Amino acid sequence: MVDLGAPEIALLLGAGFLAGAVNAIAGGGSLISFPALLAVGYPSIAANVTNQVALLPGYLGGSVGYRRELSGQGRRTLFLSLTSSVGALIGAVLVVLSPEELFERIVPFLILFSCVLLAVQPAISRRVRPAGGEGSERGSVSLHAMQFAASIYGGYFGAGLGIMLLAVLALTLDEGLQRLNALKGLLSLVIGAVSVVYFAFFGPVAWIAAAVMAAASYGGGQVGVGLARRLSARLLRALVLVFGVGVAVWLLLEGDL
């Protein structure tokens, strides 16, 4: 059992708020919140599932903020949500069944993979072309296959999920960036919600830590949408990248000690 004093609670509050904002702006918020849970003493799998529970309100806050951009995407959202739900459940089951030692070994590489996704996000964003009207879909089977794979990853770990989803949507939908970002956030919410329901029954969730971070991540998600509409995310992306790579290297070195 981890003892949460005032310093630990302050750290989790700050990490939750920043993670919610970063997820709304650029994605990669788990690269802040997951290491914070490790830092206060939670084992890797418990930190992972608690992180996913904690960030769920942040996705909700982002979706509420993006409700204007979600208009007209109802049918598309419904079918993609069904695909996402199945994939997320598979991923959640896999992480709970994973041995702690195995998960600890692969976590640094999952974090580095998330950093790579964050680094290539500008190229993904440039791939998006402004569209007139509601937009169209190219290769529905490919869209759902890629969404299914991304959802498994989201249920298993989740760091960098939003970036991965934006890549999937940008490759298969003719929509503007803000509408894709809104859809990405809502699908992240669906994946997170399915995973959290499973974790609530079968996962080692640290509920006090999750509650502390959840309230902060909701506020961060709403603030992040406002910033996403106004500011470039280049500096924020660079800072998160440096932090994420540093955490991965630290975990790799710690595993060798």
Image (tube, rainbow, N blue to C red):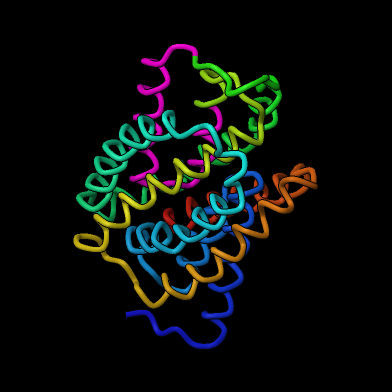
Quadrant position of residue 69: top right
The residue that appears at 48% across and 61% down in the rendered structure is 57
* Figure label count: 0
In the image, taking residue 101 as reference, residue 174 lies left or right, namely right
158 in the magenta segment = yes
Q: Position of residue 232 (x, y in %)?
A: 79, 43
Residue 6 to residue 98: above or below: below
Q: Is residue 256 left or right of residue 9?
A: left
- Residue range in magenta is 138-167
Residue 4 among magenta residues: no
Q: Residue furthest bottom?
A: 6
Return the residue nearer the eye: 43 or 208.
Answer: 208
The spot of residue 182 in percent (x, y) is 57, 40
Q: Position of residue 145 (x, y in %)?
A: 35, 22
| Quadrant into which the N terminus falls | bottom left
Name which residue lies at 51% across and 18% down: 172
- For image coordinates 64% across by 44% down, the residue present is 26
**Quarter of the figure with the C terminus:** bottom left
Task: Give the overall secondary structure of the magenta segment.
Answer: helix
Closest to the observer, 140 or 89: 140
Task: From the viewer's side, name the closer residue of 77 and 155.
Answer: 77
Q: What residue sits 35% from the left and 52% below the top?
A: 193
